[in-house]
Image: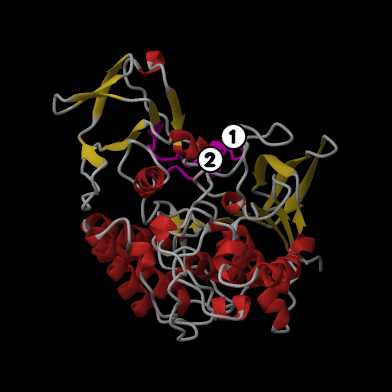
């Protein structure tokens, strides 16, 4: 018999988790399916790839990433740690709880390099269209090799959509915005805070991206930062120079007017107004249609498309948990594909989805949302052999993190947490976060060592 074939769309954290899950089964002596992953960029990581480019990439394709310079983890690394690959194993020493993007990306790559999954990924390859044949129960995937400009197609028994949902901006219109004389951009195109030094900046939105971009711009010298919220403010104790106001209503040249009747002049505007779940390569009947929330409808266990469970979506939830949640999903997906986990009937799946949707709807506070996603992770862990970790302790850390931000939005990244994987207490970073303007891995890991020693370690880390 021919092996099952599994196609994975995207080599970001979710796609890499799925590859790692199959590799783990192989290491345990199980003969898995043939797996092929398609990634439109030239390297893995998707959103974790920082690029100066906005709009399109090297081959004219829309780029994935909304990553920017000076981005540091906005949650404790102990809450996202892989349970089969610790920070201690990777860095060989304790590091702080809030690393910058290059350090986290290095960690993500470390596990994947250790497990030799790069051979399964076709880089510079984008998915153009997907169809499903009811008779053969196979997907046909139309692909473009961007490097050589060649179109071809392949068949798969299962398809995993791991392309993320932070790449298609939601762009609302505000009357008069087209006449605003300064720069207007979406958070997707934000590439660093430097350009807003000495400017009065208006940020529209009250999401984590609005919060972080606002604080980053304040840290790097913006004259003032105003955050405009639609329904409710972020509500932390902002320092002088950052404030929240009700929803923006319209512009008159460089003056913004707000719902409470106030107005103010600005030099630049960043729209932190969220993202759309967008899957242009899927036909309507296979497309996940949802707003960003903790439990999207139509996905059994948050993974299997109920109308066609051979179609698998990873990482489509709003997220407190990230890397370890993607892992838990990938292990369950793998076990289903390999016949170790049997799905119930469509009707039973629908009832289970409805139960989770109702529970999600009932929760309103951030702490309740943490508990909801914690319960979801615990259920996933019960369905596979993904290495267990203390999910309840992680939930406690999330709640402590929420309180730390309320107490001081500028200093919460200076806090320290303990790993639930190794028990290691995180180091305090050598420089307070508000004073740390360099986010390179070398500065982060080796700042206190001699220039000669640092040069040697940079050479080793590049090998």
Residue 294 sits above or below residue 391 on the image: above
Where are the magenta residues, as a range?
A: 270-291
Q: Find numbered disc 1 in the image and state the secondary structure of the residue it sits on.
A: loop
Mark sitting earlier along the chain (1/2):
1
Indicate whether 93 appears above or below 222: below
* Left or right for 85, reference 317: right
Asked if the residues shown at circle 1 and circle 2 are in contact, with their CB atoms under 8 angstroms apart, the answer is: yes
The percent coordinates of residue 456 (x first, y second) are: 74, 70
Q: Does the magenta segment cover residue 312? A: no
Q: Is residue 129 left or right of residue 307?
A: right
C-alpha span from label 1 to label 2: 8 Å
**Looking at the rendered structure, which numbered label has been put on residue 54?**
1
Residue 9 appears in the figure: yes
Left or right, 23 with respect to 255, comes to right
Q: Quadrant of residue 227?
A: top left
Residue beneath label 2, please?
191
Q: Depth check: 121 or 410 in front?
A: 410
Q: Is residue 315 left or right of residue 153?
A: left
Q: Looking at the picture, how far across and down is residue 130, in whole percent? A: 66, 42
Q: Is residue 277 magenta?
A: yes
Residue 418, quarter of picture: bottom left
Q: Residues within 10 Å of mark 1 (few under 14, many from 20)?
A: some
Please report the residue visible at 60 percent of the width from the left and 76 percent of the height from the top: 91
User: Can the viewer see residue 309?
Assistant: no
Q: Residues within 10 Å of mark 2 (few under 14, many from 20)?
A: some
């Amino acid at each position: 018999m021919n092996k099952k074939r599994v196609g994975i769309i995207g080599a970001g954290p979710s796609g890499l988790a799925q590859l790692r899950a199959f590799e783990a089964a192989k290491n345990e002596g199980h003969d898995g399916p043939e797996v092929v992953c398609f990634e439109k960029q030239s390297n893995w990581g998707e959103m974790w790839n920082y690029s100066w480019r906005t709009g399109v990439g090297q081959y004219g394709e829309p780029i994935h990433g909304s990553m920017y310079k000076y981005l540091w983890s906005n949650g404790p690394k102990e809450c996202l740690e892989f349970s089969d690959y610790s920070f201690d194993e990777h860095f060989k020493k304790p590091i702080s709880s809030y690393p910058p993007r290059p350090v986290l990306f290095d960690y993500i790559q470390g596990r994947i390099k250790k497990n030799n999954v790069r051979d399964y990924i076709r880089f510079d390859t984008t998915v153009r269209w997907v169809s499903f044949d009811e008779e053969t129960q196979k997907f046909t995937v139309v692909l473009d090799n961007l490097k050589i400009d060649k179109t071809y197609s392949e068949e798969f028994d299962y398809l995993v959509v791991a392309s993320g949902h932070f790449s298609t901006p939601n762009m609302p219109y505000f009357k008069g915005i087209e006449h605003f004389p300064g720069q207007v951009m979406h958070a997707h195109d934000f590439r660093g805070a430097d350009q807003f030094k000495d400017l009065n900046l208006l940020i529209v939105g009250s999401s984590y991206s609005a919060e972080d971009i606002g604080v980053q711009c304040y840290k790097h010298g913006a004259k003032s930062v105003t955050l405009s919220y639609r329904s409710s403010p972020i509500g932390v104790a902002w320092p002088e120079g950052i404030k929240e106001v009700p929803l923006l209503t319209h512009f008159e040249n460089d003056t913004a007017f707000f719902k409470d009747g106030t107005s103010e002049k600005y030099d630049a505007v960043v729209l932190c107004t969220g993202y759309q779940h967008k899957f242009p390569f899927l036909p309507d009947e296979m497309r996940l249609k949802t707003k960003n929330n903790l439990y999207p409808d139509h996905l059994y266990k948050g993974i299997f498309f109920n109308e066609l469970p051979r179609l698998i979506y990873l990482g489509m939830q709003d997220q407190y948990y990230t890397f370890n949640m993607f892992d838990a999903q990938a292990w369950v997906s793998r076990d289903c594909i390999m016949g170790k986990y049997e799905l119930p009937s469509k009707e039973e799946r629908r009832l289970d989805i409805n139960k989770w949707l109702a529970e999600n709807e009932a929760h309103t506070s951030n702490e309740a949302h943490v508990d909801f996603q914690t319960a979801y992770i615990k259920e996933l862990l019960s369905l596979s052999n993904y290495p267990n970790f203390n999910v309840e302790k992680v939930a406690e850390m999330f709640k402590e993190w929420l309180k730390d931000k309320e107490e001081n939005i500028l200093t919460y990244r200076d806090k320290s947490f303990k790993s639930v994987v190794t028990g290691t207490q995180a180091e305090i970073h050598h420089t307070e976060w508000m004073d740390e303007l360099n986010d390179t891995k070398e500065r982060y890991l080796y700042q206190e060592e001699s220039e000669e020693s640092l040069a040697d370690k940079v050479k080793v880390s590049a090998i």
